[in-house]
Amino acid sequence: MSDRPASDGGIAIRGVRKTYRTGERTVEALRGVDLDVAAPGVVGIMGASGSGKSTLLHLIAGLDRPDSGEITVDGLRIDSLPERELTLYRRRRIGVVFQQFNLLPTLSALENAILPGTLDRLDREECVARGRKLLGELGLSERIDHRPEALSGGEQQRVAIARSLFFDPPILLADEPTGNLDSRTGERLWDLLGSIAASRRMLVLLVTHEPAAAAHCRVVHVMRDGLLAGSIDVASLDSSHRPVNVASELALRAAELGRAQG
């Protein structure tokens, strides 16, 4: 691992630990994680339930704080930021997309997409223009006035992506983003996220437990029991680049890394 802090849209994590209390039980979600993620492109963090992958993403997103260790995102040390600066970091410097779309049901697609600008009290006309442009780029020009209940799952997730891109962040975090989508819609979403990473020269960091999802990444970091078990160069796995072959090989390699760590 390099000691160089992250910059240009990258992430550097050093010695990160996080413990939770559940009743009388103490759970070590992260036990001293070191990780470098370089931009741009789609990069995955893969692991089984309880491996610590979602906890790590939440810390990178500034939704929680580590007990110890350092987290640097796009050159900014975030683990010790004051709460107000952390709020601005979450709103302006990163985008986050979850399995649940988290759209406000009483707002239209456009109103949901421009919510970050609305919260920042930016000029309404500028926000609307920005929202229309983003939704148009994501193929939703004809759906901007529809509320979430009138949109398909894939359309709702694209609205959530538009919202996450409102401030043009260098990093998009995606936590199981296809978990509520059928396989065909999920494949289209992977293509979309890949296009976003390429066209915007940004980092899309994906958290998943599914090898089929991780097969769309350029690098996959495997987590097990709160630690980084190792990293896999996805492009080296299958010369045919068929997703089904890559996913199968990923599952095998991840299992090997987990056994080696154990």
Image (cartoon, rainbow, N blue to C red):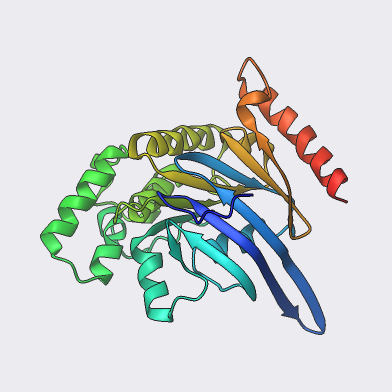
Residue 262 vertical placement versus 66 (above, below): above
| Total numbered labels placed on residues in the image | 0
**Residue 198 appears at what percent x and percent y?**
39, 34
The quarter holding residue 166 reads bottom left
In this rendered view, identify the residue nearer to me: 126 or 65. 65
Q: Which percent across, then down, holds residue 120? A: 25, 70
Measuring 59% from the left and 44% from the top, which residue is drawn there? 44
Q: Is residue 97 above or below residue 62?
A: above
Quick one: 20 or 157, which is closer to the camera?
20
- The quarter of the picture where residue 256 lies is top right
Query: Is residue 176 visible in the rendered structure shown here?
Result: no
Of 90 and 22, nearer the camera is 90
Residue 143, picture quadrant: top left
| Horizontal side, residue 59 vs residue 53: left or right | left
Q: Is residue 131 visible?
A: yes
Question: Where does residue 23 sit, x and y in percent of width and height?
Answer: 78, 83
Horizontally, is 253 left or right of 87 in the view? Answer: right
The residue that appears at 82% across and 84% down in the rendered structure is: 24
Furthest residue toward bottom: 24
Residue at image point 28% right, 38% down = 137
Q: Position of residue 155 (x, y in %)?
A: 39, 44
- State left or right for residue 18 relative to residue 6: right
Residue 123 as seen in the image, left or right of residue 113:
left
